[in-house]
């Protein structure tokens, strides 16, 4: 059969295509000349499967959507505590180009321009030439996308010619000694960063890389550590959509970032990376049709991060009695991801194992993942079953339980249950 997902995305675009509200970003001459009717959507799944509809091959400049990824690179260099000395994480409630500074001169967050310019200056080695710093950032963006990314030189030159406000913001931060580079060099690099070309599939992959704990789903490359991905997603959820972040979080509910090139990128941790393209912008510089598409996806596909799936109550696929070569056994067959909520449910079920069943089988054959806290809880549960006098057999054909060393697992570990 053919997946219905592409047809569904086509239908979403058809339902949103008639909206011609908004205007192009005419303060950048080259962006004022793009086709206003471009429209595209893309989804990237955790295994790298890509779906798309509309103008998925259309290249456009990444603009402010680059900010979370460059923030990730700066976090890698300075660490969380080190980075927070230079740039805060509090929502400003201001438009993207406002002077959002604390009394100390620290930008309020890395998503507004003044914070993103500072973040650009901090993403490379101290004293690095502007060309070397930009190349490091361009390569980093490419690792998130899973391919080499180029610069739209015409947009770059057009944007640099009108970058007076950004240059003023850079000089303001430099006056507080937040960074030491020449503000003109920093704005040159930041403007090139914003002129990097992507398509919606690139953005969906980049989003999924964040949503997968920093691992690119196409290349398998661990682009950034899991803690960096978590930090970036946290800041995106509160600051990524500027002065409409509250509306976005209530209506869509995904950590996201918009750009004046018409793109929106959003990441739902562990589930999907998504992106849209539509160049007409509202008063906040956000794609009008892009917002409509994301609202529709969130509503119809249950993609709001606060709409938690009921995995905690569905951990048990089946409980039954099975016949093994050595006699009868009580089997707990598990499914889905094991985390605190689902494993807590499992431990309660382990308390109900019949005392007259000498052998207890815990079957992980349908478990998709086990996080660290679930691993520790499960191992302790197995140990306690053994302490209660049960012989425990752990079925783990897909090695779902990480670090299942013999000294850790108080059970016999098998890939297949020897049924009689």
Image (tube, rainbow, N blue to C red):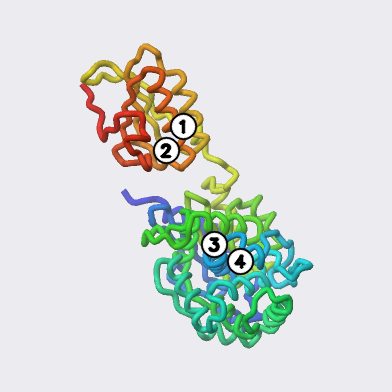
Distance from Cα at disc 3 to Cα at disc 4: 11 Å
Residue that numbered label 3 is attached to: 265
Q: Are marks 2 and 1 in contact (CB under 8 Å)?
A: yes
Residue that numbered label 1 is attached to: 314
Vertical comparison of 398 with 75: above or below: above
Residue that numbered label 2 is attached to: 336
Q: Residue 178 carries which label?
A: none
Quadrant of the image occupied by residue 79: bottom right
| Label 1: which secondary element | loop
Vertical comparison of 222 with 117: above or below: above
Which mark lies nearer to you, 1 or 4?
Answer: 1
| Label 2: which secondary element | strand
| Label 4: which secondary element | loop
| Quadrant of the snapshot with the C terminus | top left
> First in sequence: mark 2 or mark 1?
1
Residue that numbered label 4 is attached to: 287
Tell me the residue at 37%/39% (across/down).
Answer: 401
Q: Is residue 176 visible?
A: yes
Vertical comparison of 252 with 129: above or below: above
Sort mark 3 into few (<14), some (14-19) or many (20+) by Cα contacts within 10 Å: many
Distance from Cα at disc 2 to Cα at disc 3: 27 Å
């Amino acid at each position: 059969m053919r997946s219905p997902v592409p047809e569904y995305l086509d239908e979403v675009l058809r339902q949103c295509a008639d909206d011609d509200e908004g205007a192009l970003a005419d303060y950048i001459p080259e962006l004022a000349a793009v086709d206003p009717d471009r429209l595209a959507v893309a989804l990237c799944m955790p295994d790298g499967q890509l779906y798309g509809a509309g103008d998925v091959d259309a290249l456009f400049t990444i603009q402010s959507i680059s900010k979370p990824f460059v923030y990730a690179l700066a976090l890698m260099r300075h660490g969380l505590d080190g980075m927070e000395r230079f740039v805060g994480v509090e929502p400003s409630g201001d438009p993207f180009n406002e002077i959002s500074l604390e009394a100390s001169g620290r930008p309020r967050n890395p998503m507004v321009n003044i914070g993103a310019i500072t973040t650009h200056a901090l993403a490379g080695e101290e004293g690095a030439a502007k060309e070397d710093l930009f190349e490091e950032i361009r390569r980093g963006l490419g690792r998130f996308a899973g391919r080499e990314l180029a610069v739209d030189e015409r947009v770059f030159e057009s944007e640099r010619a009108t970058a007076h406000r950004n240059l003023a913001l850079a000089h303001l931060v430099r006056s507080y000694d937040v960074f030491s580079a020449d503000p003109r060099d920093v704005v040159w690099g930041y403007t090139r960063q914003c002129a990097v070309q992507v398509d919606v599939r690139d953005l969906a992959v980049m989003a999924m890389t964040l949503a997968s704990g920093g691992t690119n789903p196409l290349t398998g490359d661990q682009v950034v550590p899991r803690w960096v991905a978590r930090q970036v997603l946290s800041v995106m959820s509160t600051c990524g959509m500027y002065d409409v972040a509250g509306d976005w979080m209530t209506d869509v509910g995904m950590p996201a970032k918009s750009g004046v090139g018409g793109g929106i990128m959003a990441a739902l941790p562990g589930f999907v990376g998504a992106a849209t393209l539509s160049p007409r912008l509202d008063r906040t510089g956000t794609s009008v049709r892009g917002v409509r598409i994301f609202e529709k996806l969130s509503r119809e596909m249950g993609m709001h991060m606060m709409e938690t799936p009921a995995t905690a109550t569905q951990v048990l696929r089946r409980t039954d009695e099975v016949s093994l070569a050595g006699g009868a056994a009580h089997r707990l067959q598990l499914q889905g991801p094991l985390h605190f909520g689902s494993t807590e449910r499992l431990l309660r079920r382990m308390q109900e194992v019949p005392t007259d069943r000498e052998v207890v089988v815990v079957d992980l054959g349908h478990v998709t993942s086990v996080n660290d806290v679930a691993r520790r809880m499960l191992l302790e549960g197995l140990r306690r079953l053994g302490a209660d006098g049960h012989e425990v057999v752990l079925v783990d054909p897909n090695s779902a339980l990480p670090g299942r060393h013999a000294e850790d697992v108080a059970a016999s570990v098998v890939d297949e249950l020897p049924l009689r």
